[in-house]
Amino acid sequence: MARFNYLEPHSLDEALRMLADGGDGVRLVAGSTDFLIRWRTGFWRPDAVVCMQHVPGLDAISFNDADGLSLGAMATVQAIEQHDVIRQRYPALAAGATAFAGVQVRNLATIGGNACNASPAGDTLPALLAYDAQCRIVGPAGERWLPLTEFFQGPGRTALQPGEILTELRLPPPPPRTGGLYIKHSPRGAMDISAIGAAAVVSLADDGACRRVSIALGAVAPVPMRANAAEGRLIGQQPTAANIAEAARIAAQSTNPISDVRSGAGYRRDMVQVLTQRTLQHAVATAAGGPAPFGELRRLALQTAI
Ligand SMILES: Cc1cc2nc3c(=O)[nH]c(=O)nc-3n(C[C@H](O)[C@H](O)[C@H](O)COP(=O)(O)OP(=O)(O)OC[C@H]3O[C@@H](n4cnc5c(N)ncnc54)[C@H](O)[C@@H]3O)c2cc1C
């Protein structure tokens, strides 16, 4: 295995300086769960690694009614899965976290690493998209904010420029009467990458119509994607079984899946329809009746058989 210099910054400024000094040969690591695999196989051969584990404050998770949820990029998937406010107010994200790998990987893997790795199949990404996450990015030119919808540029490619670090994901506060769910379909279970992932978040108006709908899909296009046309089919409508079924059909049409070892393209498209329908049904039911207990959410989030 190729050797590298190991660098351990203790502040964000120090990390930025190390990235700038290292140029093309330096790679930032967070939990290292993606990094170690690519380094061991020789796919990544950095001269130096900047490990973010000792930069204070970047793992903070906080919520307030005005600003919503702030997730430090170094927050682990396990911390997100365990967070009471996330379970109550952002259940699709809690579902994405609980369907993610096993507990050992969840204890290391970070939410920022999942976003920056930019796998179309990343399990937290559909929920982050569905909750309209914004990215705080810090780099040599200062700080900028970017909607997560513009962050993903292709498999493994993001809008990050050389020397930039993702420091925070910010999710606006969900309106009252909002429900949501993410379902990962993976025939081999959580330790496998998802074959298809679907998230839906629905907010209901007082008359029961859909005030806000977001549907986001994983592993069915080069990047995790929002299904805008399907959302438009439901917004302002009553969430009847027929309207939900039609929105799910439109969601499936909007995908562009590939065939690979995990699934055929046709199967993926068919399953988007099934999973979108299920996530919408659950989102509507919990928007009206309150969040499901976490045990129920966990059972629904990972589907090995459809
Ligand atoms: C056994 C196993 C099972 C897995 N199962 C799943 C699963 O079920 N679902 C799933 O989605 N993923 C899964 N993964 C993939 C991986 O765990 C996730 O993608 C994880 O979230 C990556 O986070 P990390 O902190 O470990 O990233 P790292 O490996 O540290 O980094 C990944 C990439 O992101 C960059 N990066 C990380 N943080 C930042 C930042 N703040 N700013 C800029 N760049 C950054 C790094 O430079 C690197 O290119 C699995 C991995 C393994 C090994």
Image (cartoon, rainbow, N blue to C red):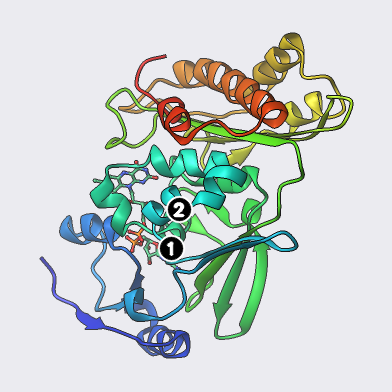
Which of 41 and 87 lies nearest the eye of the viewer?
87
Whole-angstrom CA distance, mark 1 to mark 2, is 7 Å
Place of residue 107 in the rendered image (x, y in percent of width and height, measured from the top left): 30, 56
Residue 58: x and y, percent?
Answer: 46, 73
Residue at the location (70% across, 55% down)? Answer: 172
Q: Where's ligand 1: which quadrant?
A: bottom left
- Look at 19% across and 60% down and name the residue there: 42
Q: Check whether the beta carbons of the residues at disc 1 and disc 2 lie within 8 A of each other.
A: yes
Residue nearer the viewer, 4 or 125: 125
Q: Secondary structure at mark 2?
A: helix
Q: Which mark is residue 168?
A: none
| Residue 251 visible to an observer of this rendering | yes
Q: Which of marks 2 and 1 precedes in the sequence?
A: 1
Is 12 situated left or right of 225 in this image?
left
What quarter of the picture does the N terminus occupy? Answer: bottom left
Residue 80 numbered mark, or none: 2
Report how many numbered discs are placed on residues in the image.
Answer: 2
The residue tagged 1 is 75
Residue depicted at 46% across the width and 21% down the height: 265
User: Dot 1: what SS?
Assistant: loop
Asked if residue 200 shows in the view, the reply is: no
